[in-house]
Amino acid sequence: MSEPILEIDHLQVEFRTDEGVVHAVDDVSLTLAAGEVLAIVGESGSGKTVTAMSLLGLNRSPNATFRGSARYRGTQLLTASEDELRAIRGAEMAMIFQDPMTSLNPVQRIGDQIAEQILAHEKLTKAEVRDRVVELMDRVGIPRAAERARAYPHEFSGGMRQRVMIALALSCSPSVLIADEPTTALDVTIQAQILERLKELKDETGTAIILVTHDLGVVADIADRIAVMYGGRIVEEGTVDEIFYDPQHPYTWGLLGSITRVDRDRGERLPSIAGLPPSLLAPPEGCHFRARCPHEFERCGQVPPLEDRGAGHPDRCWLTVEQKRARRVVDDGEIGLAAKVAVEASPEGLVDRRETPPGAPSRVAGDAGAAEDARVAEEDR
Amino acid sequence: MARFVVRRLVGMVLVLFAVSVLTFLIFNVIPNGDPAVRMAGKNSTPAQIEQIRKEWHFDESLPQQYLFMMKQIFTGKLVSYSDQTNVWEQIRMGLPRTFALGIGAAILWMTLGILLGLYSAVKAGRISDRVLTVLALIGISMPVFWVGALMNYYLGYKLEWFPNGGYVEISEGGIGEWLYHLILPWTALAILFIGVYSRILRSNILDTINDDYVRTARAKGISERRVMTRHVLRNSLIPIVTLWGLDFGLVIAGGAVLTESVFDLQGVGQYFAEAIGRLDVPPVMAVTLLGAVFIVVLNTVVDIVYAVLDPRIRLG
């Protein structure tokens, strides 16, 4: 791999809310090389979106504190002025958001919305911009692009809108593309199309991609490296093969076990990790995954550093490599996390998620709705 | 679009019918409302009253009386019961004054409403926002006849900064005098709306600013000013613009009655108020119908404008 173009070093993000300080991102370090695809995987509220947004300064507010460093080709993103950031946003680093249904301005034509970004960074004539817009829309697979550029967002389907978002993101040939759950709001067949398109575009343009997702199944095909986040921290980082075939952290085992498979018996419950993510208002001492981990022992009261414990890639679990390899459940060729016994799992009355009715809150502080989520989780206890 | 307009016009005919029947009936059941008695005067004999009743068709059945009045309205021959002047003539004289008041006030309240609402939203939660909130609530709570009277008394009569009511035609006193006489009425009429509009815009902006597409706009690398004007303000203004059309219609169609009366502007509103005071049915009918026409037309225009501003709206 070549020189890293993006280096995140000990990033910490905190938000002051009415309920207290939310420690959304805690000591995250990552690097991204040109043309590389890095997946950040974790549950909602694990801090992955906050990490991504912090890079572009999109979550700056009087109530947010950023510590550490995030460097893009020599620019310190965390302390950059709004003007410096503006020059980078859209042109050098572009972002695709989770919900294509609401991420486009409903009263402006699609073409104009793409053109706005191009004109913000490049001096082009109207005709040149129009040609570029049509070409971009064509490239992401929108049929009859010239005509559709004059349409409004509500005249597009969800998948088409996400293609528009991708066209928008690619419009100034950025070096880094941040895709925040780009397929979560789409149905499965469209998901595959969008991912396929992202992959092709990556190969064509050489853009590095940070793919933020909660779905390990999504990343296997496209990512070079995976960082697994939990409770604001990276708990394991490695290549796709390392994560899938030699996962070290019990949380990663749980995530791998939760991938939905069509070849499973219909009658079985979907596997899930018991318990709820930790409240980031008052994160537990030591390892954040402790409360849900069946392999917890005394040492877990101390924060395990992210380091290589002999497996060839770093993780944050005190168990030795041998213990891990022995304890992770390999069942039917799949790796999973043996569920913690219900009684043991509820020292603080934690709810076993398998007993939770559908629609029950499963998120805790970290995203935009951090405070509310945290409150919901509190009430749940 | 054409179908939409036609449907609205058909709707208007129904509205006018309903409004006219209702107004007509109300004035027929009001006690002491017999126009013949009032027209004949205090010292009249029953024979004279009977004479008037015959002359003015008051002896016919209600439906016939209604039809007769509607015919007069639509042929322009309607005359007042109290002074026998032609109603349409009177309205035509008052209309420019009412429009001068309404249009000026509407421009004033829209401009200030937007400026204050935007400022309030940008400073949300700070002292200046709270001060504006209190001021807006005071503005909304003050009745126009009271504010108008206070202004007239203190700024006009006591301090003599402004004329004590009255209206001056541009052709008579020039544009300066015209403005000078209208400043107080405009302000009095606009205060309530400035309060309402700035509050609505403030909350619209604060809603919009958290919308996903605003985040997308920021991620494009465009200037914050452009994010605010092209995305936040542009989208927050859509409901305000439609409200503006409706409120303007209401003001012209009767909302200016109090303002005109307080400042003695001699517009249609004041004419209307005086006619009600004399239980003079023809002017009341004519002004009511005119107001209804105006409101229906403005509603239609507002709906069309809304569809232009927000392409998600389909006219139907």
Image (tube, coloured by chain):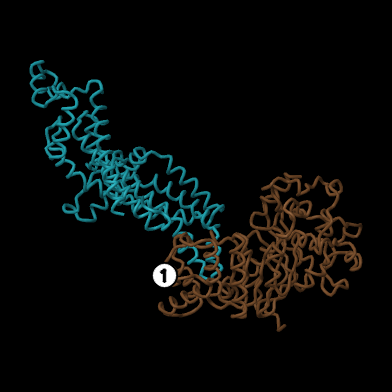
Chain colours: A brown, B cyan
> Which residue was labeled with disc 1?
A147
Query: What is the number of callouts on the image?
Result: 1
In percent of width and height, residue A90 lies at 56, 73
The three-letter code of the residue at mark 1 reads Glu
Which residue occupies 79% across, 72% down? A242
**Vertical relation: A278 (above or below) A13:** above
Which of the 4 image quarters holds residue A63? bottom right
Residue name at image x 41 percent, y 40 percent = B142
Residue B158 position in % (x across, y down): 32, 42
Whether residue A333 sits left or right of residue A323 in the image: it is left
Q: Residue A273 sits in which quadrant?
A: bottom right
Q: Position of residue B148 (x, y in %)?
A: 33, 41
Q: Chain of mark 1?
A: A
Snapshot quadrant of residue A314:
bottom right
In this rendering, position of residue A139 left or right of residue B75: right
Can residue A240 be seen?
A: yes
Name which residue lies at 67% across and 72% down: A222
Question: Between B74 and B45, which is closer to the camera in this rendering?
Answer: B74
Badge 1, how many Cα within 10 Å: few under 14, some, many 20+? few
Identify the element where label 1 is drawn.
Answer: helix
Closer to the camera, A56 or B8?
B8
Q: Is residue A232 above or below residue B268?
A: below
Name which residue lies at 19% across and 22% down. Answer: B34
The answer to whether residue A281 shows anywhere in this view is: no
Q: Nearer the viewer, residue A1 or A191?
A: A191
Quarter in which the N terminus of chain A is drawn: bottom right
* Rendered-image quadrant of the C terminus of chain A: top right
